[in-house]
Amino acid sequence: MQNRVFQSGNVIFEYLDTWEVEKADTFSNPDCIATLSKGENNLLNVVAFPTETNLDSYKEFMEKCIVDDGGVILNSEFIQIASMDAIKLHGNIKTPDITFDIHTYVFIEDGNIYIFELRTADFSSKTIKEYDDLISSFKLE
């Protein structure tokens, strides 16, 4: 396995070659700058857009959205990763068709919000470790 580099605008991160860069779904989400997949059970979307909010307010908003969608918050905390302050959230959503986890990191820097959201039905620690490594490599240039 080798690392590859993704860059879009000022956003840069590294990912393993076991992940595949897909065409970003800008039709449904015009703020989407990256979509990566690993197999059929892992989908990562990265969005970025200007914001006037802060991490405290966004954390409350994000938690409410997940609960309103019938999800459960398993963990939600402020952390420092990639030399930046961030929100790290782990939730679980059950639908009639599938049960999946959401692993989200949110950064707010210089009036912009950067959201990394992994939806996964692959509950292996290996995939989560790869995702955490990707987040650790996140840089703004």
Image: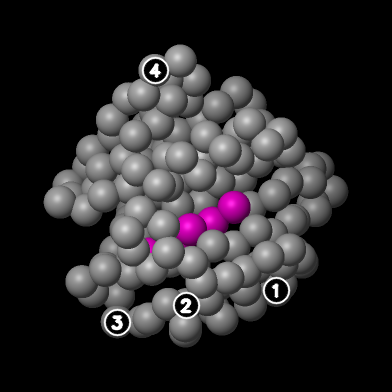
In the rendered structure, the answer to whether residue 69 lies left or right of residue 94 reads: left
Q: Which mark is residue 12?
A: none
Q: What amino acid is labelled 2 in the image?
A: Tyr
Label 1 vs label 2: CA separation?
Answer: 15 Å
Q: What amino acid is labelled 3 in the image?
A: Glu
Please name which of the two marks, 2 or 4, marks the residue nearer to the observer. 4
Which residue is farthest right?
96
Q: What amino acid is labelled 4 in the image?
A: Gln
Quarter of the image holding residue 84?
bottom left
Q: Count the marks.
A: 4
Residue 68 position in % (x across, y down)? 70, 74
Residue 112 position in % (x across, y down)? 26, 68
Helix, strand or loop status at disc 3: loop
Colour option used:
one colour
Residue 7 position in % (x across, y down)? 23, 38
**Residue 29 visible in the shown view:** no
Nearest the viewer among 28 and 123 is: 123
Q: Which mark is residue 58?
A: 2
N-terminal-most mark, 1 or 2: 2
Q: Are marks 4 and 3 in contact (CB under 8 Å)?
A: no
The magenta region covers 103-107
Q: Is residue 25 magenta?
A: no
Residue 136 position in % (x across, y down)? 40, 47
Give the main secondary structure, helix, strand or loop, of the magenta stretch: strand
Neighbour tally class for label 4: few under 14, some 14-19, many 20 plus, Cα within 10 Å? few
Q: Are marks 4 and 1 in contact (CB under 8 Å)?
A: no
Label 4 vs label 1: CA separation?
Answer: 39 Å
N-terminal-most mark, 2 or 3: 3
Q: From the image, which quarter does the N terminus lie in?
A: top left
